[in-house]
Image (cartoon, rainbow, N blue to C red):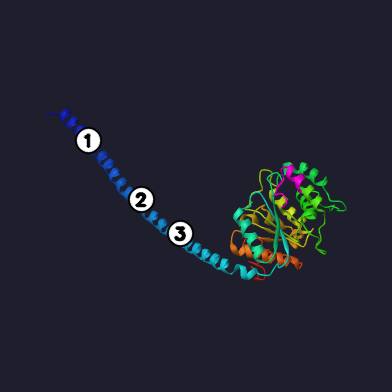
Amino acid sequence: MGAGAASVISLRQHAISLIAVFLALAVGVVLGSGLLSGRVLSGLRDDRDDLQTEVNDLQSSNNALGEQLNAADGFDAAVAGRVVAGSLADRSVVIITTPDADPADVEGVQRSVTDSGASVTGRVGLTESFVSAASGDDLRTRLTNVVPAGAQLRTGSVDQGSLAGDLLGTVLLLNAQTAQPQSTPEELGLALDTLRGGGFITYDDGAVAPAQLAVVVTGTAADSGADGNRGAIVARFAGALDSRGAGTVLAGKPGSAEGSGPIAVVRSDAALAAGTSTVDNVERISGRITVALALGEQLGGGAGRYGTGPGATAVTVGAAPN
């Protein structure tokens, strides 16, 4: 065979060798990838199992805490009547609710108040229009048109919350010193009817009378509504209401003590916090007990920030500081 044939065979063998090398590399990559994928998948499975274990542990802890809270509520429910009994004997309380107040919380607060020996003289509901800054001008106009004869609204009460609290305080609360009405039944009826006619409050006819003390029950209200002022309006309303009677307690769920919620606004304002008591765990029986005790404290001229949320200084009246 000649040299040309040998050269052709050599080139062919060389090409085959190169193909074999690349094929081996390809097979190696495929096999290596499979091995790597197996290791990665195995690692991911291990991570998943570890995370699932953590989730299960957290769920178990959460369930245990829930059981402890339920047990605490059960105990509180059993002793609530004895804890508050007589603390508000022969006193009177009016209950005012914001649009987001939970009916169960309102009923719980009323039960605690009556267990303490006080009478509830009525319930007034504030509407969405009442707590909306967009309705402020209309609300202020209606309020200034129904001021009781001889009553003077405070000059500092210019925002809608303060003005409403000042006016409603003169018709819904008794004078702190004399325990006598600050308006006539006709003036009370006119004020309430005017505000209800404007869509600002709700109440049952003939079911509201002046009281010595007031409780304002709100909800979570961590957000301040579309106009951003809901929390401030409710806070200033409660503060102005407090200045017209023997005392006011603002009670809500934990969220109301956060951000721009009404309880957070009161606690961040030294003047409001000095007069108006706040309770940020009204959804729990312990919080409802605290509402009654805080009303008693208000009668003595005191005020406090109670609960477990931001700004609370003690869990309840008389408890060690947080």
Say which label, 1 or 3, has the lower sequence index: 1
Residue beneath label 3, please? 59
1 vs 3, front mark: 3
Kindly tell me whether residue 84 is visible in this rendering.
yes
3 vs 2, front mark: 3
Q: Say few, some or many: other residues with alpha carbon within 10 Å of mark 3 (under 14 / 14 to 19 / 20 or more).
A: few
Kindly tell me whether residue 306 is visible in this rendering.
no
* Residue 40 numbered tag: 2
The residue under label 1 is which amino acid type? Answer: His
The vertical placement of 154 against 141, above or below, is below
Highlighted magenta segment, given as a residue range: 192-206
Q: Quadrant of the C terminus?
A: bottom right
The vertical placement of 22 against 291, above or below, is above
The residues tagged by marks 3 and 2 sit, at their Cα atoms, a distance apart of 28 Å
Q: Position of residue 71 (x, y in %)?
A: 52, 66
Nearer to the camera, 198 or 15: 198
